[in-house]
Amino acid sequence: QVALVESGGGSVQAGGSLTLSCVASGYTATTYCMAWFRQAPGKSREGVAAIDGDGVTRYVDSVTGRFTISKDFAKNTLYLQMSSLKAEDAGTYYCAASQYVAAVPRFCEKNSWGQGTQVTVSL
């Protein structure tokens, strides 16, 4: 089992920036594929970005050019740098980890999940 703990959420004005972090611990051999998902109130969870063990990154179209996913492999820490934030980026952001890469927008399959961190974007 791998444990994932997110941090870095908060409240930001539209156009602002925020960086999320996710620390993986435990059986980190199952973290070849790591991703960020988000869920807005009343909506289903959606994939945002992913990175695999070879450093290949993928993004959903709505965040391309504004968000950057990265991973410190030595620290087993996943990051999501978010800039030019919009109201529609608000929601709970979840870190996910898996051995299995999937196509966009699923990104990773058979995931372990973190507890989530809240992002609020005010106009």
Image (cartoon, helix red, strand yellow):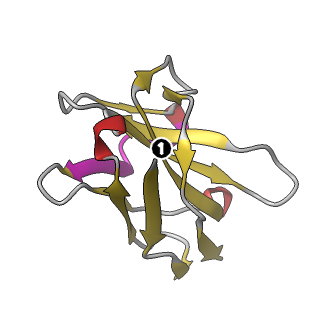
Pinpoint residue 21: horizontal percent, then vertical percent: 36, 66
Residue reaching furthest to the right: 42
Q: Residue at x 31, y 49 (%)?
A: 68
Instruction: Determine if residue 74 is in view.
Output: yes
Residue reaching furthest to the left: 74
Q: Nearer the viewer, residue 58 or 25?
A: 25
Pinpoint residue 33: horizontal percent, then vertical percent: 37, 33
Is residue 98 depicted above or below 85 in this figure? above
Q: Nearer the viewer, residue 38 or 73?
A: 73
Residue 46, by quadrant, is top right
Crowdedness of circle 1 by 10 Å Cα count: few (<14), some, many (20+)?
some
Secondary element under disc 1, as helix, strand or loop, is helix
How many numbered badges does the structure rendering display? 1
Instruction: Determine if residue 51 is in view.
Output: no
Residue 63 falls inside the magenta stretch:
yes
Residue reaching furthest to the top: 103
Residue under label 1: 63
Left/right placement of residue 65 relative to residue 89 reads left
Left/right placement of residue 81 relative to residue 113 reads left
Q: Residue at x 62, y 52 (%)?
A: 38
Left/right placement of residue 52 relative to residue 86 reads left
Residue 65, by quadrant, is top left
Residue 6 falls inside the magenta stretch:
no
Q: Residue at x 45, y 58 (%)?
A: 3
Q: Nearer the viewer, residue 120 or 6?
A: 6
- The quarter of the rendered structure image containing the C terminus is bottom right
Left/right placement of residue 42 relative to residue 13 reads right
Looking at the rendered structure, the kind of residue marked 1 is Val
Pinpoint residue 9: horizontal percent, then vertical percent: 50, 75
Is residue 60 depicted above or below 18 in this figure? above
Pinpoint residue 71: horizontal percent, then vertical percent: 23, 50
Q: Which region of the structure is painted magenta?
A: 62-71
